[in-house]
Amino acid sequence: MNRFFQIVLTACILSAVFHHHVIAQQPVRIEDQQPHHFISFAEMEYLEDKTNRLTFTDILRSNVHFKVNTKHIPKNFNTGSSYWYRFKIIHTARSKKNWILEFFDQSIDQVSLYAPDSAGRYHVHYFGTRYPFNKRVYQHKNFIYNLDNDTDKEFTYYVKLKSSQSVGAIIALRDINWFFKYALNEYLIFGLFYGMVTVFSLYNLLMFFAIRQKQYLYYVVYNLSIGLYEMSSDGLAFQYLWPHSPLWNEYGYGLALFLSSIFALLFTLSFLSVKKRAPQFYKLIILVMIARAVFFVACLFNKDLFGLKLVEFIPLMAAYVTGIYILRGNYKPARFFVLGYTFLVIGFVIKILLLIEAPWLPYGPITYYSLSICFVIEMIFVSFAIGESIRSLRKKEVEAQKEVISQLQINEALKDTLNTELNTLVIERTKEVSDKAAIIEKQNQEITLMNAMLEKDNQELHENIEKVSRARVMSDEVDFAEFSKIYPDRETCFKFLSELKWTDGYACKKCGNTQYLAGFLPYSRRCTKCGYDESVIAHTIFQNSRIPINKGFYMLFLVYSTKGKISSHKLSELLLIRQSTCWAYNSKMQKILAERKKELKNAGQAGWSMLVLEN
């Protein structure tokens, strides 16, 4: 029984001690020998404002009750609420160092710090990703506030935090000299990390240009997307990429995560040849990509959804499980792929444990940057996987070349044998063909001679027929249909006029130049010197004629052949032209016929053509 009371008493004492440490808020003291200190656990109290209406005046009232923080890193688990934090700092005027407050989570939208001065009056200072980067006192990725440490009093500081995603209220009290040293080292590590991302990206880009396989381009975009996500999370993207566009802070990391998931899955499909080696996983990955794209579109309409980063675990596991399945099928390059993704899964699991604040997890820089470290390891192992894939391709290429060479040697031997046999057959066949060719050549010569004789006879016959026809037409009184066989259309008439008009050569009517080019109308000529374009019917009896030229020819022929005795009524009947028109042309032609009667006395059949040209 005494033992029982001792146990109960001990439990009560421990409970009281624990209760004292939890309830009583512990102030933070500025001490030169301790260059930095994270404010957490009982040193900080918090208040969730679900209405978002509490002002700083409301917070200072006694009826507002803060709760003691029991977590290593307090967070705004409800993104729709505003969170108030307060902590106490015991200032030390004798301190020889300058002190700052540093807010670590670089993705907080709005931070309002209510800091007291030496007289106890509060002044508000605003930080956050919604304000341009150049407005900061220190051009650093974290939010920095200079403490006025000129008194030995204890002051209470208040912080209002409002963000569209879950963020941590990580607040540190630091010596400014220690901060600069730590910041330089941190930026050096960042430079190494992003340098490795750049190097791996350039390496795979060169591989893409050398081999022209899309998988390398997918991996380049994946690496750059990971780099963009890390820069967005670290605040470096805001500092270096879009310092004047705070709006990008709300979408940059979400876009980077989306691209990294999509191109990681595209790389998986291409690198592991999933469609051929695992068709069922190919369909699964396609469905995951579609679902991820739909979720990204939804995030664009509701940016609070970007905070659901655990969604990325689904594409990660889809690629990881696919790699394990294909590795079991003895595809060797999948070994390094699976190993790299194993570290990536470990880093993701650590991030999840940080999110739920597992009490047994060792908190520190390595834990905080675990996912970034795992990304680097994953890039190294995937590069090994790519290298092994290339070696495998080269090995297959060498084996294929050996098979091709062997087959070429066999083909060469067969070709020599066939060539020998074919040469023999060709010689025999050539002799036969030569004999037959000689006979055929002799026959062809005889046929050529006969064709030449026939061609000559045909030409003479054609010329005789044409002469007979022309003579008959020009000597007899023929109808228009038969006359049209000699002059069927305008083209034929123009050709005749051209030959008749310029029989003795061309001379320009205006400048006398004898050089010409083709004119606008058929058979017309344009002077190369003055540009005068002379029609073939200009200065002829047919100039300004309104009747078809071939009918004009026939009318002139009839007037000439009848020695001007044909009437305009007869011409109208033969040519189907109005009598008045025929009378006008008949009168003109008879006048010219009378004027040139002496010239036409012995002209014969061609005399009618002498009436065409004007003197």
Image (cartoon, rainbow, N blue to C red):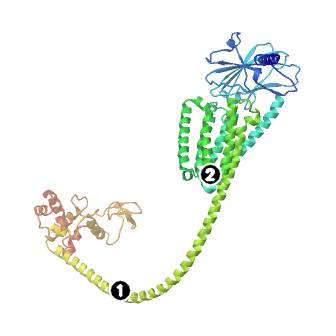
The label shown at residue 211 is none
Q: Tell me if 312 is positioned left or right of 478 in this view.
A: right
Q: Tell me if 476 is positioned left or right of 503 in this view.
A: left
Quarter of the C terminus within the rendering: bottom left
Q: Identify which amino acid the numbered label 2 is placed on.
A: Arg
Q: In terms of image quadrants, where is residue 61?
A: top right
Report the label total.
Answer: 2
Q: Tell me if 504 is positioned left or right of 67 in this view.
A: left
Residue at image x 48%, y 87%? 427
* Residue 591 x %, y %: 18, 64
Query: How dense is the environment of label 1, judged by Cα within 10 Å: few (below 14), some, or many (20 and up)?
Result: few
Q: Identify which amino acid the numbered label 1 is placed on.
A: Asn
Real-space CA distance between mark 2 and mark 1, rounded to the nearest whole angstrom: 78 Å
Question: On the image, numbered disc 2 is attached to which residue?
Answer: 328
* Residue 41 x %, y %: 75, 23
Q: Tell me if 542 is positioned left or right of 184 in this view.
A: left
Q: Earlier in the sequence, mark 2 or mark 1?
A: 2
* Residue 465 x %, y %: 21, 78
Q: Is residue 335 above or below residue 600?
A: above
Question: On the image, numbered disc 1 is attached to which residue?
Answer: 444
Helix, strand or loop for disc 1: helix
Query: How dense is the environment of label 2, judged by Cα within 10 Å: few (below 14), some, or many (20 and up)?
Result: few
Residue at image x 81%, y 26%? 37
Q: Is residue 482 above or below residue 20?
A: below
